[in-house]
Amino acid sequence: MKQLHKPHGLKYRQLLAVLIITFVATPFLSGSLGGILSALLLMYTMIVIVMSLPLPKWWVVGYVAIAISAFTIQLSASMGWRDNSVQSLSLLPQAIFVLYFGAAIYWIGRDIFTTRTVTADTVRGGISIYFMIGYLWAFLYGMVATLNIDAFSQPLLIDDSYLRVFHFSFTTLTTLGYGDIVPISDVALVLTNLEAITGQMYSTVFIAILVGGYLSQSPDR
């Protein structure tokens, strides 16, 4: 089965760039137009994720089709955000985003954690995983907030923008915890604790792998 590959050593460069751009652009993507642009950017991010993985060509086509479907559903929800019947549609694309980021974390993690040679691309892949952990939990929080508007002390989804949900997720992941947004429901409390634990454990393991790989490549060994 033919697979799609990135040039050696550059597999994760575009992925990391897109993840950073998505994060930085979020404050400017609000309102109806911002919601459309945000949906487009997330769809492109999903496609870049798939293209970064060593998958058979027909898998890539299928995943791209799912990404486009998620964009269409999210766009429909964005156009009628205040309609409760349409708002429920936002759960589906968020669930798809969770699955996409979860699968990408697994495959990229398996790649960089089993490599015997530490390169710049290994570092890029590791940083990409860290960003994707934040995005994955952000969409989990978004799903919780969609199902229960009182799950957090403040609304997370405002004016079709993911700014607050990304902010809350990454401050939790880094255990910075400003305290401006606080989990209220039991599910939200458990998710925040799990994300904080995951962020600390991942950072420790990734640094250990980098150091171990560097030492194994040292000419003195």
Image: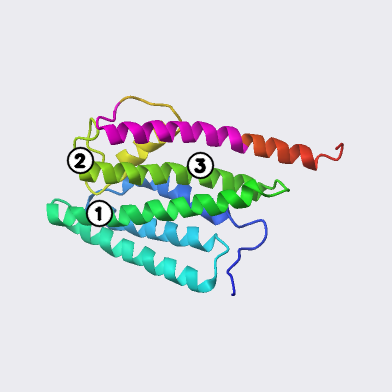
Assess whether residue 197 is covered by the magenta stretch.
yes
Residue segment shown in magenta: 180-206
Q: Amino acid at mark 3?
A: Tyr
The foreground one among 103 and 82 is 103
Residue at the disc numbered 3? 130
Depth check, front residue: 21 or 141: 141
Spatial distance from mark 2 to mark 3, Cα to Cα?
27 Å
Q: Which of the 4 image quarters holds residue 39?
A: bottom left
Q: Amino acid at mark 1?
A: Ser
Q: Is residue 150 above or below residue 90?
A: above
Labelled disc at residue 148: 2
Asked whether, in this view, residue 49 is left or right of residue 54, the answer is: left
Disc number placed over residue 90 in the picture, else none = 1
Q: Residue at x 29, y 36 (%)?
A: 187
Are discs 2 and 1 less than 8 Å apart at CB?
Answer: no
- The dominant secondary structure in magenta is helix
Query: For numbered disc 3, what is the local secondary structure?
Result: helix
**CA gap, disc 1 and disc 3:** 24 Å
Dot 1 or dot 3: first in sequence order is 1
1 shown above or below 96: below
The answer to whether residue 198 is visible is yes
Find residue 162 and report its horizontal and vertical position in percent: 31, 45
Q: Residue at x 38, y 37 (%)?
A: 169
**Viewer-nearest of discs 2 and 1:** 2
